Image (cartoon, coloured by chain):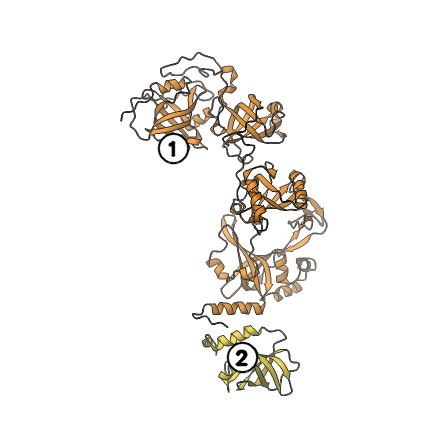
Amino acid sequence: MPVNLTRNAIAMMNSGDVNSKPLVQVVDIKLIGNSQERYRFLLSDSESTQHAMLATQLNEQVRTGRVKKGSIIQLIDYICSTVQNRRIIVVLNMETIIPEYEIIGNPKLPTGSEPEANKSMPNNNLLEPSTRSTNNRYSAPAPANKAQSFQPTIQPAYQPPPNYKIQGPIMKNEAPARIIPIAALNPYQGRWAIKARVTAKGDLRRYNNARGDGKVFSFDLLDSDGGEIRVTCFNAVVDRFYNVIEVGKVYLISKGSLKPAQKNFNHLKNEWEIFLESNSTVELCPDEDGSIPRQQFSFRPITEIESAENNSILDVIGIVISVNPSVPILRKNGMETQRRILNLKDASGKSVELTLWGDFCNKEGQKLQEMVDSGLFPVLAVKAGKVNDFNGKSIGTISSTQLFIDPDCPEAQGLRAWFESGGRNTASISISKELMPGGSKNEIRKTLTQIKDEGLGRSDKPDWVTAKATVVFIKTDNFCYTACPLMIGDRQCNKKVTQSGNKRWLCDRCNQEFEECDYRYLLQVQIQDHTGLTWVTAFQEAGEEILGCSAKEMYLLKYELQDDTRFGEIIRSRLFHQYLFRLKIKEELYGDEQRVKITVVKVDKVNYSAESRYLLDMVTKNFPNRKQF
Amino acid sequence: MDTSSPAAFVNGGLLRMHVGRKVRTVIQVTRSDAGSVMGKSTDGCQLVVRGSPPAPLTSYVEVIGVAENENSIRAELWTNFGDSFDASNYDQLCQLANGELKHLFL
């Protein structure tokens, strides 16, 4: 079937015509870009060719082979712009008409000078510019910023394939830039405008670095297609826009530069971030645009949070079932902040602990406390909470977190309906407690060689087992450490303290000095059963059970009184006692190697009656014909 | 370990299987006289143990001796087992020792 590509399509596109929907052929596809996946097409109308960048939202089509070399495609939506003196087309939307076809006609492949970013000498005759120089070009600010190099020219409707030698763009489009979806924004875009609602406004921050003082603030935008992007302003630009931007209002924004998003601070789903400049425009749109939602969430059910990665950022919504009072917490840098813990429950049958830090405690935290105290169970939506895996999985607020009490969204309504019709009374399991299956029913009993043979401790979560074994050796070097006795909230700090001066101790975390430190056990013990032996580590409580006295007493005996005889007697007297050890087994990285670390969580004396029953049960359960005793 | 005269683990019901032979059992003392002790076996039977018990006698005592008949033992060795004892565990032991796991015992 003969195919006719649109005549002179390339010239039409180059002359700025973005309304025709030409039929062209993909002569070549090249993957370029250092850090992002970007495809560059070489399009042909059977006579001339032109490079075009594929917008990232279309990358899938190349990956799945829906469009490939030789494909005949129709360009539905595209933009022409000029970067330095190269004409660049960006394809925003296209349709593959024929996936495979031999090259039509005799299209002239591109040649031409490739000036480096700072030189003007024509040098390369390369057909395809190197990746490095490509990035040089593309990372230059959009031509809109070089106001001084604009040369308005009347553009003829048709032109033969030109060989560009002039500097600057060929034409200046005075018409207002088209509003494009946020998802289509990219640094290769010549002129763009977006219309979006501000969903979050950051604080004005001042900073001081090698280049001097500065100030910065950011705000997040959401448009009607659900696209989100962060916008940042520095210094003078802050003065222009800080008071203009208000959360909840819709703005038309144009002429900013696009740079890769800083993933550490920017948790929006966009690889780019907008930086506004002196010529950027921000226009308030007073007509309430109902098509743009106020806020965009992607809530995860609490049960999914259990398997979420530590430090990942997510949104969650739940009913607040408990709120604890604010507690002052001393941070590592010595600054004090507030902390509040609450529990959220959702329809997945699980509940999660939410930790509010700083201002959240006094604002939303206080309000929630009052609501819960007066018998209400409010819905709380959290945007951008951070997952913490210290004790099971819990969520904490970060600077960019937003809390919404009883939001007006379908998920909140659904949650409220579930709660009122029974959800209130269903018990939920907390994912924020370290799973320590306790009680004799859930205890998993293992022998010491089973720990190694079965590879316990190798998965993501630690393994908890019980083993009956005898203490055969207690390491007496470094059996305890000097610990901080100060209280942090409801727990003792217990961080290792260092000596400062003579007879005084310093804790880094609490940033305080004191005369008396606490002594806590850090015992290395070897235990043995009928199958083998292994080293375990016992901390304070377990250590006290094993040695029968406090770490402080042992410390004084050995180091102050220097009574090695008595010390040795005590140690020897504690050997060869049999206990039921509750062990936490986890593989950890020590330097380069993975080693299985076993910690004693609890030490119980063997209850002979219960143990006998256990053994009898083990003996009889494997009989071929079970007898009822 | 002296294996010259092994004593079979018995409760009240199993005593009859070992009449005339060396046995051992634990009883809960119900009455104690000069020459004998009456007690409840771990399976609830009344047993008589002849001999001189130690003084004082705890609630539970183990006796090793020769089974005279199906409810009496002539004790040679008495051992106080204290005031708390898990009778059901011991009972299960006796049953295993005379039943499925007999081959593990002397």
Residue wearing tag 2: B11
Dot 1: element: helix
Chain drawn orange in the picture: A
Query: Which of the 4 quarters of the picture holds residue A47?
Result: top left
Residue at image position (58%, 73%) is B86
Residue at image position (59%, 49%) is A424
How packed is label 2: few (under 14 Cα within 10 Å), some, or many (20 or more)? Answer: many
- Could you tell me how far apart the alpha carbons at marks 1 and 2 are, in whole angstroms? 83 Å
- The x and y percentages for residue A294 are 56, 32
Name the dominant secondary structure of the magenta segment.
loop
Between A135 and A75, which is closer to the camera in this rendering?
Answer: A75
Taking the view exactly as shown, the residue that stands out farthest to the left is A1
| Label 2: chain letter | B
Looking at the picture, does residue A469 appear above or below residue B77?
A: above
Amino acid at circle 1: Val
Looking at the picture, does residue A324 appear above or below residue A623?
A: above
Is residue A183 shown in magenta?
no
Query: Which of the 4 quarters of the picture holds residue A204?
Result: top right
Amino acid at circle 2: Asn
Chain drawn yellow in the picture: B
- The x and y percentages for residue A17 are 41, 18
How packed is label 1: few (under 14 Cα within 10 Å), some, or many (20 or more)? Answer: some
| Label 1: chain letter | A
Dot 2: element: loop
Residue wearing tag 1: A62
Residue interval drawn in magenta: A454-461
| Contact between labelled residues 2 and 1, with CB atoms less than 8 Å apart | no
Q: Are marks 1 and 2 on the same chain?
A: no
Quadrant into which the N terminus of chain A falls: top left
Q: What label sits on residue A454 in the rendered view?
A: none
Q: Is residue A501 visible?
A: no
